[in-house]
Amino acid sequence: MKLSALIIITLIGLFIPAAHAGLSAWGADYTTNGAGVPPSLTNITAIASGGFHALALLPDGSVRGWGDNSRNQVSIPPQATNIVSVAAGLFHSIALTDNGSVLAWGTDYAGLTNVPANLTNAIAIAAGGFHNLALTSKGAVMAWGENLYGQAAVPCSLYQAAAVAAGGLHSLALRADGTLIAWGDNQAGQLNVPVGLTGVIAIAAGYCHSLALTTNGTVAAWGSNAEGQTSVPSGLTGVVAIAAGYSHSLALTSDGSIAAWGSDLGPGETRPPILPSPSMELRGGFGNGLALVNDAESSDEPEVLGPFGGLAITGLPILSRVTAYGQDLSYSASNLPAGLTINPPTGIIRGTAETAGVYNVSITATNTHGTGSLACSLVVLEATPTVITNAPAPVPTAWLASYCITNLEVAVLEDPDTDGAATWQEYVMGTDPTDSNSVLEIRSLNLLPGMQQVEWIGGTGVLQYLEWTPHLHTNWSILSTNMPPTPITNLFDDSILDPEGFYRIRAVR
């Protein structure tokens, strides 16, 4: 699958070539010429800022790096071709290719460059201090690298993810329904997502703080405020993109201007400069800021840079902004899902998708000098997802995710714990599909004169019936009913006229 046009709804212009986009840098200088950007670097399509280095993606899918190379973090490997996205950590770099694979280079501390062998369908990446995250086309998140604070231990409850962000020692994931999940270090409260925060369309993570952009164009911030990095400027609205540095925060507004708050961004310059052209993308590093700018001339033909796309969910609102190179543009879209509309003057796409499916959407930007267009793919998932297979019982995605099972369609027919029960059968029984000791069975049966004593173990969240029949050709009688919240051993001790016969445990979900 070609991924260059498949981008998450919360990202703006990250993967699509922008033939004339320039780069502005301020704060800590990663070069020796005093400008912060290599003088020969032009035609940039995406950017990343790390601890003391930076990366730029070019239209031909190649990557340029500059700054600190003490760990070979800017020594671009020869296999880094057909790249569609880049990310930078403290002393390492990662890149996403157009076939969904991920490359990593720089320090190999904690296995940072050891990309998981089963990661083949990534659509987004993030680099933290010493850990990495990747989002797959199934909405799953994979992590590797340092896990001292649990920052690489993806919660099993995370499913239908739409975006990821990696901080110094913590991680964030945005679900397709606009809610957040955070894990890792919480020493500064960076995991304490504000109560009631919904409608999130973008996330960012600094060293000890977190940011979220909502559908109404406002920014929420939490975690460390030692340098003022979570003190969002009063009256800041119309935000379309966010970025977080080590201890500072950045926001891009709809008119292309930049707002910044937090620590000083470098010697002699504490805030981003007034840029001559509107900005399209932001990145924050250890002590600097980078901005990708639209320096189109009035006579240039339009070029669509970043259509919305990726994952959405039925019944829940989405908002995204289409960006394009050019001036005086008018936007249109074809084959949008029912319930979504595009605003021609602004390129804002909003609404609520009504029907699940895969939509091949075409975004067009037009001015008096020509037309530019680009196709993207939007996957709309059901609000209450289930995995429908040829197994007798459909299995909810959320239940599979709770056991960290992501290869959904295949997994329901497999037996991961080799206990003789397929995953779909374990769901019906309420047992753990990854634990061979989690079963639904009679453990012991003691028949005494006029009495039977039955011990059995069951699963969770399902009705369990202990049943008895004197002969297999007659009806079964219910001796006991139980629905334990956790796996427990059940004991039935009672007397009937004839304890001899047949016993069974039956689960009903």
Image (tube, rainbow, N blue to C red):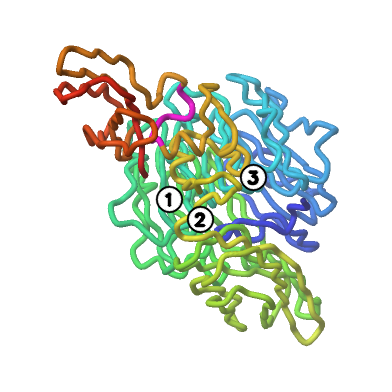
Nearer the observer, 11 or 369 = 11
Q: Name the residue type under label 3.
A: Ala
Query: Disc 1 versus disc 2: distance between alpha carbons?
Result: 8 Å
Q: Which residue is mark 3?
A: 48
Residue at the (46%, 42%) spot, across then down: 158
Disc nearer the start of the sequence (1/3): 3
Q: Secondary structure at mark 2?
A: strand
Nearer the observer, 108 or 488 = 488
Q: Residue 201's mark?
A: none
Locate residue 324: give its quadrant. Answer: bottom right
- Residue 293: x and y, percent? 67, 62
Q: Quadrant of the C terminus?
A: top left
Q: Residue 242's mark?
A: 2
Which residues fall within the magenta stretch?
429-435
Which residue in the rendered view is the most extreme toward the bottom? 368
Q: Look at the image and say whether residue 434 sits in the magenta stretch.
A: yes
- Residue 12: x and y, percent? 61, 60
- Pointer 1 and pointer 2: residues touching (CB < 8 Å)? yes
Q: Secondary structure at mark 3?
A: strand
Residue at the (37%, 59%) spot, across then down: 198
Q: Name the residue type under label 2.
A: Ile
